[in-house]
Amino acid sequence: MKYRTLGRTGFKVSEVGFGAWGIGGGLWHGSEDAASMRALEKAIDLGLTFIDTALAYNSGHSEQLISRALHGRKERVVVATKIPPKNGVWPAQPGTPIVEAFPAHYIRECTEKSLRNLDVDAIDLLQFHVWNDAWAHETEWQETVRTLKKEGYVRSWGISINDHQPRNVLKTLDTGLIDTVQVIYNVFDQSPEEELFPICQEKRIGVIVRVPLDEGGLTGAITEGTVFSASDFRARYFRGDRKQQVRERTERLKKLLGLEAATLAELALRFCLSHPAVSTVIPGMRTIVNVERNCAVSDGRALTPLMLSELKKHRWERNFYGA
């Protein structure tokens, strides 16, 4: 496993981190705690030192599983979690006052819940789970962030940027209060490269890449015949003819497989790690097999400029999270 510095936090984190939404259950069908624990423990055994979770992942269940997995271990694992919006609206909508999403008392209340779930004295990285850049200069959240850091309950602060909106944080980064951003970045959505990544490099902001496999689309496993449980959010994400659209595009990507990557998942993860702004990438991993495959990508081998040039051609602007 290779390691990178998570921006100005100073944390050394594994290039491949653990996205812990799926292990929480809830909107992810088929999640079992015993299998999740085995996956978490195997990942740590392989040198993984970064886990990303959220209070909203099945009402804190994901946080609690992580606490159990880390109990008694000697390894230093950086854990990031998130504050859900008080109004329950994902993503944050234009024109919504910040007091509806993140009032000061609510930020503190959620911090305390996550501290209990994780069973820690301080949270390594606490992120706002949605954001609107119009809130950048609101003083209440700024003072709350400063206070919780000064009191020692939060070591660093971050923002999980709204789906496919990499520019919706740029003013906030100018405040100097945000240490990391979490953003969708993959072969299909390459938009963070345009403005967000250069600014993060300039300001030493850590970059956490989420959805590197497009919710499974970039694994090549999604076809017209794929069936999801009605309770699984992917049934909506891949609804209508979207599975066909994804399959057609991944079939074209498969032509690039060979010496540089044996599978689409490997190619997709190597693409993300090829950008120097990226600190860590957090695929969801609910089985030991996926943990081993994903962690193996962190071997220090970069994609060639020719391959990266070819992958640029597969950019696909769309939003499957939207209506």
Image: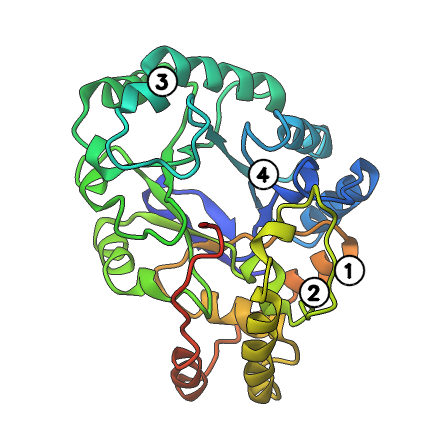
Mark 3: secondary structure: helix
The structure residue drawn at horizontal position 33% and vertical position 63%, both measured from the top left corner, is 191
Residue 287, image x, y percentages: 77, 52
Residue type indicated by callout 3: Leu
Q: Residues within 10 Å of mark 3 (few under 14, many from 20)?
A: some
Residue type indicated by callout 1: Val
Residue 194, image x, y percentages: 25, 64
> Is any atom of residue 59 visible in this view?
yes
The structure residue drawn at horizontal position 57% and vertical position 54%, both measured from the top left corner, is 237
Question: Which residue is disc 2 drawn over?
Answer: 293
Q: Residues within 10 Å of mark 1 (few under 14, many from 20)?
A: few
Q: Which mark is residue 289?
A: 1
Mark 2: secondary structure: helix
Q: Residues within 10 Å of mark 2 (few under 14, many from 20)?
A: some
**Disc 1 to disc 4, C-alpha distance:** 23 Å
Depth check, front residue: 136 or 71: 136
The structure residue drawn at horizontal position 58% and vertical position 68%, both measured from the top left corner, is 218
The structure residue drawn at horizontal position 65% and vertical position 72%, both measured from the top left corner, is 220
Against 190, residue 233 (above or below) is above
Against 278, residue 246 (above or below) is below
Q: Which mark is residue 76?
A: 4
